[in-house]
Amino acid sequence: MLRYQFVTAEEFHVKWAAHHPHAPCNHDKTEYLICGEGTMTEQEMNAHKEVHWIQEEEGE
């Protein structure tokens, strides 16, 4: 089962950027999603994104 984790921008640039250069991030690039690492399930990851990441409007 694929696992996920969210990391801060600082953690991402220090530890993850080299191996996950295209990791998705929130609109202000303060939090990044690392796929294949961590303890969150897909359902938990989607719930976190729904609450903490601003959803872009269609067409923007």
Image (tube, rainbow, N blue to C red):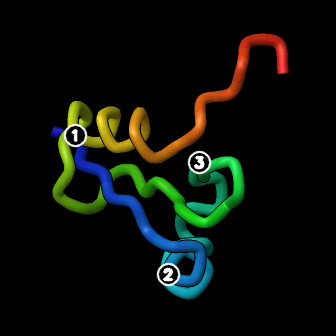
Q: Residue at x 53, y 59 (%)?
A: 32
Question: Front-most of 24 and 53?
Answer: 53
Question: Front-most of 60 and 20?
Answer: 60
Quarter of the figure with the N terminus: top left
Q: Amino acid at mark 3?
A: Pro
Q: Determine the CA span between mark 3 and mark 2.
A: 14 Å
Find numbered disc 2 in the image and state the secondary structure of the residue it sits on: helix
Kindly identify which numbered label has been placed on residue 11: 2
Image coordinates of residue 38 in percent, x first then y, are 24, 62
Is disc 2 surrounded by few (<14), some (14 to 19) or many (20+) residues within 10 Å? some
Q: Would residue 25 be found to the left or right of residue 15 on screen?
A: right
Q: Would residue 18 be found to the left or right of residue 59 on screen?
A: left
Question: Front-most of 27 and 14?
Answer: 27
Q: Answer yes or no: do the residues labelled 1 and 3 have beta carbons within 8 Å? A: no
Quarter of the figure with the C terminus: top right
Q: Earlier in the sequence, mark 1 or mark 2?
A: 2
Q: Earlier in the sequence, mark 1 or mark 3?
A: 3
Q: Determine the CA span between mark 1 and mark 2.
A: 20 Å
Which residue is label 3 attached to?
24
Image coordinates of residue 41 in percent, x first then y, are 19, 41
Kindly identify which numbered label has been placed on residue 35: none
Image coordinates of residue 28 in percent, x first then y, are 71, 57
Which residue is label 1 attached to?
44
Q: Residue at x 45, y 46 (%)?
A: 52
Q: Determine the CA span between mark 1 and mark 3.
A: 16 Å
